[in-house]
Amino acid sequence: MRVPRPWPRVFWRLVKRLTPTSLFGRSLLIIVLPVALMQIAVTYVFFDAHWQEVNSHLTEGLAGDVSLITARYEQDPSPANLARIQAEAQENLALSIVDEPGAILPKGRRPSLFVAVDRSLTRALAERLDAPFWFDTNRYPAYVDIRVKTPTGVLRIIAPKDRVFATRGHIFILWMTVATVLLTGISIMFIRNQVRAIERLAIAAEAFGRGQDTPFLPHGAREVRQAARAFLAMKSRIQRHVEQRTVLLASVSHDLRTPLTRLKLHLAMTPEGPRAEAMQGDVAEMEHMIDDYLAFARGEGSEGAETVRLADLIGVVCRGAALTGAAVDVDADPALQAQVRPGALKRALANLVMNAASHARHVSVSARASSLGGVEIIVDDDGPGIPPDRREDAFAPFSRLDAARALNPKGAGLGLAIARDVARGHGGDVTLGPSPLGGLQAMMRLP
């Protein structure tokens, strides 16, 4: 049995769904909505408590005049009496009267823009007149057409519209509308200036995450400037940490290369044999590990971004991987381009492709435009693959998934970590999944 949700929870979920998601939209809603509600409330109170009351008095006065004119005409419907009534009404009441013998009242009428006016006039005429009547407040811009049924026909009375309702009421509405628009415009201007400062902070943070050092100065409200200064301080600490790590790893690499060079010289003078070959293999592995450590620490962060053709870059990487003996197929659109750091991306792709080539006989590399925007570079192989529950572990630095799929035994377990670090530095990512070839699929997404 389905338990109905409490209505407050459903209501708030509906409000959240209808509420703007951007800070600009929400800030504007917070400021403009109360102003608009206040203006609507004031306008409603004005019409209900003042304007309608004034209109009611006006319509009652006009209905009394119409009732008096109709009664005097019915007492003596002669032309002479009608002429006297017309002259007195024109001079004292600003009413024009016409007798239409044998005429009948029209059927139906066009509703007025102000429904309250028609309702008030209908009520006032019904209270004062016993005979049938009809009126139209829309036919003439400045007059109201009132017709009353008489024994001889129809008595038509044309009255100025200001005798029916306060014609300056629309000026009040106009001023309220202008005030609302003006206040909304001022709110938009101030809110936009504050949101622009936050947007620039977000752009600077995103650019820093991609390895780009863009100039940024704090500005905006006090809280926004405080957040910007905190970001700049954090950025400085991160850069200092990266520089210290790079210098440390470079120093260690430099210090280790000196004894390695001496070992190479000693091995070069050692007679050939199984022991010498094993020692040369160990030295080569140590040198390769040192290169990996240095590349991981450096992160290619100082390289500038360029627009490159991905097919050319992938081709260079795959030609190097084909030298390992694996069959490498390339399927990349020659016109596909991306703004990347070429050296960093080349190293990341080389890690992915060489990792696949060292564990499979067949490797397929493809590049295509993504339906979500950006590009996708996919590396498939027919190797043993990695279990789903261990795929994220493969991205950990120095990870060696020997039990499932021994990553490059000559490396330090940094290949996938470097590839993901480079992809995320470009604003993308690297994910692992099952390959249609039966092995592992590594997909690199780039903006």
Image: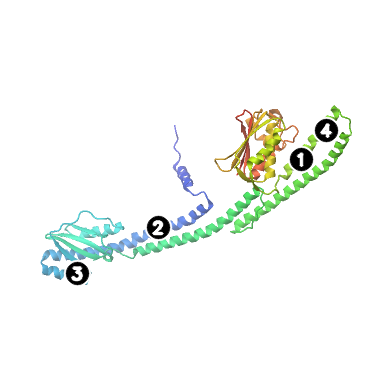
- Judged from the image, the secondary structure of the residue bearing numbered disc 3 is helix
Q: Quadrant of residue 365?
A: top right
Pick whichever, 299 or 272, lies toward us: 272
181 vs 406: above or below: below
The Cα–Cα distance between marks 3 and 1, rounded to whole angstroms, is 109 Å
Pick whichever, 143 or 432, lies toward us: 432
* Precedes in sequence: disc 4 or disc 2: 2
The residue that label 1 is drawn on is 291
The residue that label 3 is drawn on is 89
- Residue flagged by tag 1: what amino acid is it? Asp
Residue 318 in the image: state x and y as whole percent.
68, 36
The Cα–Cα distance between marks 2 and 1, rounded to whole angstroms, is 71 Å
The residue that label 4 is drawn on is 280
* Precedes in sequence: disc 1 or disc 4: 4
- Residue flagged by tag 4: what amino acid is it? Gln
- Residue flagged by tag 3: what amino acid is it? Ala
The Cα–Cα distance between marks 4 and 2, rounded to whole angstroms, is 87 Å
Which quarter of the rendered picture does the N terminus lie within? top left
User: By what rule are the colours in the image chosen?
Assistant: rainbow
**Left or right: residue 19 compared with residue 85:** right
- Judged from the image, the secondary structure of the residue bearing numbered disc 1 is helix
Which quarter of the rendered picture does the C terminus lie within? top right
Asked if marks 4 and 2 touch (Cβ < 8 Å), the reply is no
The Cα–Cα distance between marks 1 and 4, rounded to whole angstroms, is 17 Å
Q: Which residue shows up at 76% across the image and 40% down it? A: 291
- Residue flagged by tag 2: what amino acid is it? Ile
Residue 225 in the image: state x and y as whole percent.
62, 57
The Cα–Cα distance between marks 3 and 4, rounded to whole angstroms, is 124 Å
> Farthest residue toward the bottom?
91
Residue 140 in the image: state x and y as whole percent.
26, 62
